[in-house]
Image (cartoon, helix red, strand yellow):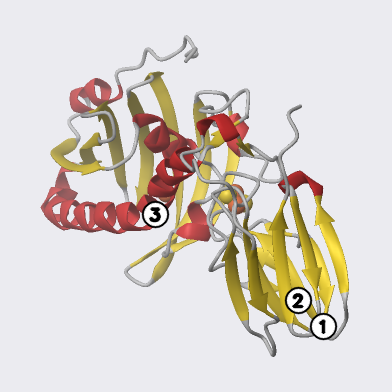
Amino acid sequence: MQTDPFFTADILGDLRSMNFAITETSVSATGEYLVEDVLWNYQDARHTDVVHTGVMCNAPFFVTRNSLCTLLVMKNFGLPVPIVLVQYFKDPSALYTIQSLGFGFLLRSVIHMTQETETTTHITIDYHVISHRVLKWLHPIIVRMLKKNFERLLQEDEPMRLRKMELRRMGFVNTSPNRLTYLDTLNISQNNIRFDPAKSRAGAPAVEQVVPVPNGHATSCVKLDDEKQFRLVAQGGEVLVFGTVCPHEGADLSGARCENGRLVCPWHGRKVQPLARIPVGQHGEVRLDALHTTIAYTPDAIRFTPHERRVT
Ligand code: FES
Ligand SMILES: [Fe+2]
């Protein structure tokens, strides 16, 4: 990672010399994912208000490759509080943040990420709570709140970090040339995920599947192999066929809600179009060339047939 060359200020030293009260505390966790998954997650400027409960608004207003300034509105003690959060990298293994907490408090954190084993990452966050001395008696309450928040945010972020590991095992690769920069995460209509058969764990060929036509508002999933996984949603006299891997960053769409004929990605909220539409009560066929699959349908059943992948 190329870092911007302007990080020189000793923020804590400055505040100490001005006699502010500073309380230090740390939290840590270990998870079954890679450092790059955690890094990507922390740099992801667009997921915060979609994924995290309690974040009412997230508006990044100044973003570079290695730094991000965003306005968050969070519920604190039932009140919406505007918070300015600044995040930046001094080096790839540590992420620095400084944020206003509202009510005269400032929080500085340093997030350290280390690859513990081939598949596990250890995360430590060192917090500094800063305020005027007369408010120091409130620091223990803020520390308790930070620890609770850390657990909650981790719980909400972890499914996507684990998903990144699953995608890797299935053979999906990230094609974004600037990944692991804040800037790259801004555009959620970019398609960053591609299946690479050479990386897939599935040795066995894809298998044909026949499923009954779902009726009413039913929804079901069909899996031919790691690449060819489909979600069927019955809606208004049609069956909509979607992929289950969001083309943006790979979130799992197999449980995503369907709104006006599109799946809403649970990670950034992108509206994903169906790959095919099957009219109920008719006979016909649709070819999904990009997924090397033909879908043949009758009024009773839908048949998914994989074809040979052409070497390009
Ligand atoms: S993963 Fe980003 S919109 Fe789906
Ligand atoms: Fe998050």
Determine whether the beta carbon of the residue marked 3 sits less than 8 angstroms from the nearest atom of ligand 2.
no
Ranked by sequence position, the earlier of labels 1 and 3 is: 3
The residue lying at 52 percent from left, 51 percent from top is 47
Q: Amino acid at mark 1?
A: Val
Q: Nearer the viewer, mark 3 or mark 2?
A: 2
130 and 119: which is toward the camera: 119
Q: Is residue 104 left or right of residue 60?
A: left
Direction bottom: furthest residue: 216
Secondary structure, mark 2, is strand
Q: In 3D space, how far apart are the residues under numbered discs 1 and 3 (Cα atoms)?
A: 35 Å
Q: Quadrant of residue 310?
A: top right
Tell me whether the residue at label 1 lies in contact with that at label 3, contact meaning CB atoms closer than 8 angstroms: no
Q: Which mark is residue 280?
A: 1
Q: Residues within 10 Å of mark 3 (few under 14, many from 20)?
A: few
> In the rendered image of this protein, does residue 95 appear above or below residue 145?
above
> In the rendered image of this protein, does residue 288 appear above or below residue 37?
below
Q: Amino acid at mark 3?
A: Pro
Q: Amino acid at mark 2?
A: Val
Secondary structure, mark 1, is loop
Q: Which mark is residue 6?
A: none
Question: Which residue is labeled 3 in the image?
Answer: 159
138 and 120: which is toward the camera: 120
Q: Which mark is residue 239?
A: 2
Residue 52 place in picture, x, y as percent: 43, 59
The residue lying at 17 percent from left, 30 percent from top is 19
Tell me, yes or no, if residue 60 can be seen here: yes
Ranked by sequence position, the earlier of labels 3 and 2 is: 3
Tell me whether the residue at label 3 lies in contact with that at label 2, contact meaning CB atoms closer than 8 angstroms: no
